[in-house]
Amino acid sequence: MSLLPERRSNVNDDEANGGARSLPEDQVFELLTRVPLDGLAACRVVSTRWRSITYEPAFAPLHCRRAAAVSGYFVQGMARNRYRADFVSMHAHAAPVPGAATVLSLDFLPSAHVRLVAVAAHRGLACCVEADTRRRPCYYVCKPATRQWRALPNPRVRFRTAATAMAARPCSGAGAGSAAEFKIVRFSIPALRDRLRCEVFDSRRFAWRRAADVPLCPESVHPSAPAVRAHGAMHWLRWHDQETAAQDVFAFDLRSEAWRLIPLPREVDGRDHPWARKQISAVEGRLCLLVTTEVATAADEEVLEVWEMASYAEGRWEKKMTVSLKSLHAQEGTVILQHLCSSDVAFLHSFCRVMWYDFMRGKMAEVKVNHVGIQEVFKYESDLIPCELGKARHPPASTPFQGGSEG
């Protein structure tokens, strides 16, 4: 049973890349494990064969060691009225670059109480906000892997935040000290509560600017749900519409600042099951919908359905997997699904622990954490090279920001 279609040769794609096709697969594997982290985005469009290799289970741990990178999750919760974000990973790493951290955390920031609100898919950048309600909020951009940070100008913080997302331009290979270019979008709730107020921060201008508002009910977006990046856009699963009871996905493209609503599959959206749990994730750059329901059995068995975005332009979904969670709960007790790491591996959490679970082979790894309850999970990948967190020295005024393809 596989979440995604089995790897198959795309003749037209590979013939257009004769050099890539002629290399033996073991040589391609060795080559790609040495490519810098942000370079993988370009390698994945060379051919479907190269793309499949970079998502094989054996690839990530070897790539982290050889390319001096980190890959894992920041899990965030609250205890004693303070947020805490811990980094967890299956892949051990060293810090061969001076200034890089061997244990990732946010304790290097000037405030002792910050909340992680967004992570970029490239450059290992994150956006954090001062969470002490007794003080004026302060926004930070940071690179946890190198313990670098910089304060940002504040947006209109008098409007409560509804959602935040971040995108960065992949590393150009300039080495340490190169300027990191990034954008942050913040949706907030205006006084009339009739739309999403939109602001965009551009590192090249080092300032926020007002963008076009989005005419959606601001309460329809869950304020603590991290954005899911896929197909070049940011996505949030919305609550049910108050009038139609329909549910959809809100998509926002940071490059064009265009937005759209993607309906859920009719079989899922029209299901008469009030307790079905829905969430979205990204697997190999594709948007996926995860639906967990209970089936009428003596043991109250839970079933997970996974729907993949088959055609993003058309908003067409395909069911890719249905799997019983009975054996998982029997082995691990009550666990909560957070993210799909790959075609068969899920990232889950329970009381004071997180785990990677292969639906075909069982548990792969488990890590103890200090959180009784985890509220947010952010996928985090980064190189260990310091960069300049701020305005580029000579930003090309006519060049649009491009956030890069999915990693």
Image (spheres, grey):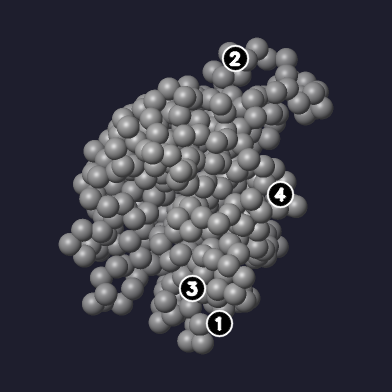
Within 10 Å of the Cα at label 2, are there few (<14), some (14-19), or many (20+) other Cα atoms? few
Residue placed furthest toward the left: 80
Label 4 to label 1: alpha-carbon separation: 29 Å
Q: Nearer the viewer, mark 4 or mark 2?
A: 4
| Circle 3 SS class | helix
Amino acid on which the number 2 mark rests in the picture: Gln
> Quick check: 303 left or right of 172?
left
Measure the alpha-carbon separation of dots 3 and 4: 26 Å
Residue 7, how many percent across, how many down?
Answer: 65, 24
The kind of residue tagged 1 is Asp
Amino acid on which the number 3 mark rests in the picture: Glu
Residue type highlighted by circle 4: Arg
Q: Nearer the viewer, residue 265 or 283?
A: 265
Alpha carbons under labels 4 and 2: distance apart: 37 Å
Image point (35%, 70%), residue name: 138
Q: Quadrant of residue 158?
A: bottom left
Q: Nearer the viewer, mark 2 or mark 3?
A: 3
Please state if 23 lies on the left or on the right of 216 as rendered: right
Residue in the foreground of this view, choosing between 43 and 53? 53
Q: Classify mark 1: helix, strand or loop.
A: loop
Give the mark count: 4
Within-10-Å neighbours for mark 1: few <14, some 14–19, many 20+: some
Of pointers 3 and 4, the one earlier in the residue sequence:
3
Task: Name the residue carrying label 3.
Answer: 219
Q: Which residue does the numbered mark 4 point to in the structure image?
A: 316
Which circle's residue, 2 or 1, is located before the other in the chain? Answer: 2
Quadrant in which residue 111 is drawn: bottom left
Can I make out residue 297 in this image? Answer: yes
